[in-house]
Image: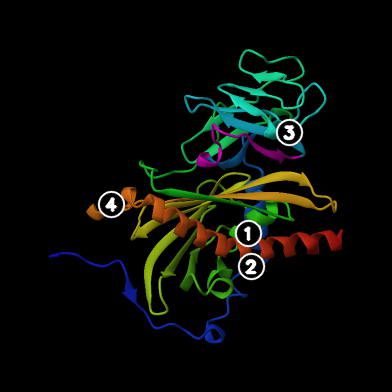
Amino acid sequence: MMGYKSPLQRFSPETWSRQRPTYQDADPRVIAGALRWSQQLPSGNWYALAGSRSIRGDRPFGTTIAGVEIVAWRDRDGVLHVGPGACPHLGAPLDAAQIDDATLICRWHGLRVGAGNDTARWCPFPSYDDGVIAWVRLDAVGGETPTDTPILGARPADSTVHAVTRLTGACEPRDIMANRLDPWHGAWFHPYSFARLEVTQTPPREGITEENHRFLLTVTFRVTRRLGVPVEAEFTCPDPRTIVMRIVEGEGKGSVVETHATPLGSGPDGRARTAVVEAVIADSERPGFRFAHRALPLLRPLMNHAANRLWRDDMAYAERRYQLRQQRS
């Protein structure tokens, strides 16, 4: 095709052990300062539950957030409903209930909860569906001034081409945040995905503001050993439990990866548990990108596979950070 330019570029891969070390650049004080700043941001008491597509109308979705049992489902019009996950009668798990439009029918004794059946002992939580992520607002947990909707970063105007992965680790949300606020580990820890990574801008150690808090880097996303897609990307924090990586120059400009860290509570071993809900939202100015909408059933598993591979490593990073902190305390 005349005028077509492939986004793929050839590059000479470095031997992993011969890369330029980044430990001198990865200043712990910069990472700690960026983390402290992010934790002071407002959240409006909103927590990411899961990908929108994971909340269905044929069976309830159950989880915990900060030790609070949650149940979510959709009515016949696709509207999201979220509420306490325990039946107010005898505490039966409502993630095993039967969905009847906007209500749930408890399987233990047939008690209905939901629209028109709320009681003083069971009231729904505010919820929000942005088309990619399903959210719940827990004012008693967050303790902040509530907002009507979650505080989101910039997204492509059309978020149809997206995939969401969710996994759990033994750590706290700040360990997930610290992982993402350390971009220097990318080519060392994930050489199968990243090459030629250079951090070109960082926040200051102190005096971080909305204007100077971003990380900026250049990186090549590897497709094969010698082919990759070079881009410039930024990392920003819209709230205390979210990191957004956005491509600012290069192929897929405007595409984002949203990493949401949701505290679940303590596991049976007493250690904290956190769910990572990560959304990849792709965009492209190329005319052929419209065909990606048709290929979504094939693209989503591939996008999820790539995200899961990265997070198997990154979760080990976050869990190790949590473990070391627990040992010191």
SS for callout 2: loop
Task: Out of 99 and 276, give the one closest to the viewer.
Answer: 99
**Residue lying at 57% horizontally and 21% vertically, measured from the top left:** 102
CA gap between label 1 and label 2 equals 9 Å
The quadrant holding residue 11 is bottom left
Q: Mark 3 touching mark 4, by CB under 8 A?
A: no
SS for callout 1: loop
**Would residue 256 be visible to someone looking at this image?**
yes
**Disc 1 versus disc 3: nearer the observer:** 3
Tell me the kind of residue under disc 1.
Arg
Q: Mark 1 touching mark 2, by CB under 8 A?
A: yes
Q: Which residue is mark 2?
A: 27
Residue 141 is marked as: 3
Dividing the image into 4 quarters, which one contains the N terminus?
A: bottom left
SS for callout 3: helix
Instruction: Estimate how packed mark 2 is, as few (under 14), some (14 to 19) or many (20 or more) residues with alpha carbons within 10 Å.
Output: some
- Residue range in magenta is 52-66
Residue 248 in the figure: left or right of residue 36 = left
CA gap between label 2 and label 4 equals 43 Å
Q: Which residue is mark 1?
A: 205
Instruction: Estimate how packed mark 1 is, as few (under 14), some (14 to 19) or many (20 or more) residues with alpha carbons within 10 Å.
Output: some
| Residue that protrudes farthest toward the top in the picture | 116
N-terminal-most mark, 1 or 2: 2
Tell me the kind of residue under disc 2.
Asp
Whether 54 is among the magenta residues is yes
Q: Which residue is mark 4?
A: 291
CA gap between label 1 and label 4 equals 45 Å
N-terminal-most mark, 3 or 4: 3
**Residue lying at 40% horizontally and 71% vertically, measured from the top left:** 223
Tell me the kind of residue under disc 3.
Val
